[in-house]
């Protein structure tokens, strides 16, 4: 991006400015700041100290404050978001964002290469291999040298406008030299990531504030992108790799810029524009055997990288050949992801703790000798129930193999019986609740032991935690650790107690500054207006998940309607069977629950169905269900698309189902649906087509 002479000149100007601050003009000052940001965030090699950078930055702020008309969109000061994002607007991508086909072994790769060679009629193909960054994908548009829009992937056709948040990422330039390259507009793609260090640092901060920790760097990155306050995004120190140019205007003559003839060249082009592209991380090889060899080397070295990758992406290097190979509706035929195997580690099962959940179910949790597995230290894993313990053959003191695949929760694969010394002990299930000492019971139809004392303190804490959770009332700043703390101090006794918390007392607790108390107060207040279905879900009625809660809410006007509803009436709702219906009726006849509901009403929570009309009713009356792993859509997004058009999501296959959308590894639901002739079974691509065709209708 900067050549030697330019670097020298910019360093000279920096020095001059630091000694005689008044000697510099605004344009030069911005150039100098851009340069140092680039050195620090892209090249990873700072040429000045943080203090010196800050002096330059403060000088810029002073000049801009003296005359706000001097502030330009690309000024480094404009990264600092000063307004909150309200709703993220949905915007179309210039070119759809496709997904990648996956491969897991050499055979898959050989197969991919053979198909590509046959289709192109070539002896061998040159590939460019780069990391498959484990983060959140983004699409950026620059026009007339300026970053004008950044959005999430969304459904691949449209994403959400997250420009303000993306501006907090220092390795993404606000301005790039497009005009100098004869380009007016460019759309590029990449991945926002959080380095392992940024992730650990941020979690340390959360820990010190007694807040719940982020699960892994990928969730941390994708969660950050949709945050309301750009300042919070800035605190997370995100990073971004840019790896793809999807659109250039005017369409370049292939001869104009030789870099734009190959994928590796476009990575260099992006690097020259000031982006952190995988320029150093890429590898160009001339045949598939070299790709396979490289994959093995990279898999062995993945833990050495400062960020998480979940595989490699192998791309046909010649862009003209890429065009010739084209794409399916789902993925390009010129690229394939090579996914690394789940990471495994061995450790010792030291003891087992028994945790009591909100429904009283007692779950054994294996406490392990802490072991690092893919950048995350694992020290405890749920082992579900007695049957699971038998199936995995687990004894206290056993050496066990544990596994972590992507963002999946770590699992115990099995114990290594051959390493037993004879001192291992059987895992003893308690006969009484470990928290309130009530005798545990096990119903014949269930695998779990339960504590049936609804006043058991562990259950109360868990019920409150469920009530405030993200998919329920979504009360932020009230993590499980805080709930426990408030409960133990007698500040919070039950669910209605959330709305009568004594904030003055909380403010006096260690770790609760004014800001955190203010945040807590406002998120509790905001939660009172949550839609009815969230409240129904939050109540924690057995067998009532989010989908059922939505069905119920759409059929009633007021929460109290449920105190009068009968099992027969509930059974007439789509998707509700006898088990669910009887649980709902039981809940709304329980005097304790009725007392709680009464309190919530008095405290001002919304208990009415506001009857939001779907935006487009083209799927009204139709029932949908997704099964298997979808490649392009997140399941929740697919479900939202159906609901936005008036369709309904069922939770199981029945004759009421109209469409079953089938992803990879679909199992019993697909088999069951095949037997019911009226159900239309469709692929994800067909579903997207259906949604799109309906939008035009
Ligand atoms: S290329 C048409 N390159 O992986 C081009 N994707 O599983 C498609 N990803 O949605 C993307 N690192 O979010 C590409 N070096 C890389 C990548 C990469 C991570 C993500 C991307 C994509 C997903 C597909």
Image (tube, helix red, strand yellow):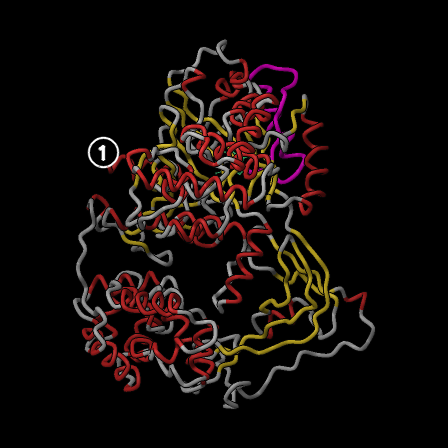
Residue 533 lies in magenta, yes or no? no
**Does the closest atom of ligand 1 sit within 8 Å of the Cβ of label 1?**
no
Residue 651, horizontal then vertical, whole percent: 36, 58
Relative placement, left or right, of 19 versus 345 is: left
Image: 254 above or below 520: above
Nearer to me, 94 or 115: 94
Name the residue: 47% across, 44% down: 136
Determine if residue 276 is in view. Answer: no
Residue 504, horizontal then vertical, whole percent: 35, 78
Q: Which residues are magenta?
A: 101-130
Nearer to me, 653 or 148: 148
Name the residue: 21% across, 70% down: 607
Outermost residue on the right side: it is 421
Residue 50, horizontal then vertical, whole percent: 55, 45
Image: 3 above or below 173: above
Determine if residue 471 is in view. Answer: yes
Image: 405 above or below 568: above
């Amino acid at each position: 991006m900067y050549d030697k002479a330019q670097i020298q000149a910019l360093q000279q100007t920096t020095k001059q400015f630091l000694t005689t601050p008044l000697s510099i003009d605004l344009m030069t000052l911005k150039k100098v700041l851009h340069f140092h940001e680039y050195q620090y965030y892209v090249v990873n090699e700072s040429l000045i100290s943080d203090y010196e950078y800050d002096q330059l930055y403060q000088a810029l702020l002073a000049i801009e404050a003296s005359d706000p008309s001097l502030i330009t969109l690309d000024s480094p000061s404009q990264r600092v978001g000063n307004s909150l994002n309200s709703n993220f607007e949905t915007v179309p991508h210039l070119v759809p964002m496709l997904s990648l086909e996956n491969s897991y072994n050499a055979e898959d790769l050989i197969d991919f290469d053979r198909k590509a060679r046959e289709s192109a009629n070539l002896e061998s193909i040159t590939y460019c291999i780069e990391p498959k960054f484990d983060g959140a994908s983004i699409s950026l548009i620059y026009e007339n040298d300026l970053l004008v829009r950044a959005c999430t992937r969304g459904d691949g056709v449209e994403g959400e406008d997250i420009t303000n948040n993306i501006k907090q990422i220092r390795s993404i330039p606000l301005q790039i030299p497009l005009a100098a390259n004869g380009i007016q507009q460019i759309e590029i793609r990449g991945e926002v990531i959080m380095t392992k260090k940024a992730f650990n640092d941020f979690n340390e901060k959360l820990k010190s504030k007694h807040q719940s920790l982020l699960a892994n760097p990928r969730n941390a990155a994708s969660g950050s992108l949709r945050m309301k306050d750009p300042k919070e995004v800035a605190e997370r120190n995100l990073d971004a790799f840019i790896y793809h140019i999807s659109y250039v205007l005017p369409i370049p003559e292939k001869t104009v810029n030789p870099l734009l003839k190959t994928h590796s060249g476009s990575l260099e082009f992006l690097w020259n524009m000031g982006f952190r592209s995988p320029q150093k991380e890429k590898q160009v090889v001339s045949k598939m055997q070299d790709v396979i060899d490289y994959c093995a080397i990279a898999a062995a070295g993945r833990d050495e990288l400062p960020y998480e990758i979940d595989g490699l992406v192998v791309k046909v290097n010649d862009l003209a050949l890429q065009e010739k190979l084209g794409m399916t509706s789902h993925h390009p035929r010129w690229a394939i992801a090579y996914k690394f195997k789940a990471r495994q580690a061995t450790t010792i099962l030291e003891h087992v703790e028994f945790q009591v959940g909100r429904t009283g179910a007692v779950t054994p949790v294996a406490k392990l000798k802490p072991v690092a597995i893919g950048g995350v230290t694992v020290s405890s894993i749920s082992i579900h129930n007695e049957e699971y313990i038998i199936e995995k053959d687990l004894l206290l003191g056993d050496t066990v193999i544990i596994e972590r695949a992507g963002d999946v929760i770590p699992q115990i694969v099995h114990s290594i019986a051959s390493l037993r010394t004879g001192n291992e002990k059987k895992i003893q299930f308690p006969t009484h609740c470990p928290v309130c000492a009530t005798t545990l019971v096990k119903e014949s139809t269930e695998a779990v032991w339960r504590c049936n004392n609804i006043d058991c303190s562990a259950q109360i804490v868990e019920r409150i935690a469920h009530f405030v959770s993200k998919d329920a009332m979504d009360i932020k700043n009230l993590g499980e650790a805080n709930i426990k703390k408030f409960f133990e101090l007698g500040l919070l006794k039950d669910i209605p107690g959330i709305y009568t918390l004594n904030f003055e007392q909380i403010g006096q607790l260690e770790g609760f500054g004014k800001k955190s108390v203010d945040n807590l107060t406002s998120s509790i207040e905001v939660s009172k207006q949550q839609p009815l279905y969230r409240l129904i879900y939050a109540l924690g009625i057995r067998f009532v998940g989010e989908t059922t809660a939505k069905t119920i809410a759409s059929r009633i006007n007021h929460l109290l309607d449920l105190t009068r509803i009968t099992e027969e009436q509930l059974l007439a709702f789509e998707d509700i069977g006898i088990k669910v219906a009887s649980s709902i009726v039981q809940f709304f006849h329980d005097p304790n629950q009725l007392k709680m509901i009464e309190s919530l009403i008095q405290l001002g929570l919304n208990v009415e169905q506001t009857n939001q009309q779907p935006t487009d009713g083209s799927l009204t009356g139709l029932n949908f269900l997704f099964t298997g792993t979808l490649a392009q859509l997140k399941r929740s997004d697919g479900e939202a698309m159906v609901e936005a058009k008036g369709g309904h999501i069922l939770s199981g296959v029945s004759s009421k189902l109209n469409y079953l959308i089938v992803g990879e590894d679909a199992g019993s639901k697909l088999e069951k649906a095949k037997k019911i002739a009226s159900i239309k079974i469709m692929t994800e691509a067909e579903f997207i087509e259906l949604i799109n065709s309906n939008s035009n209708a």
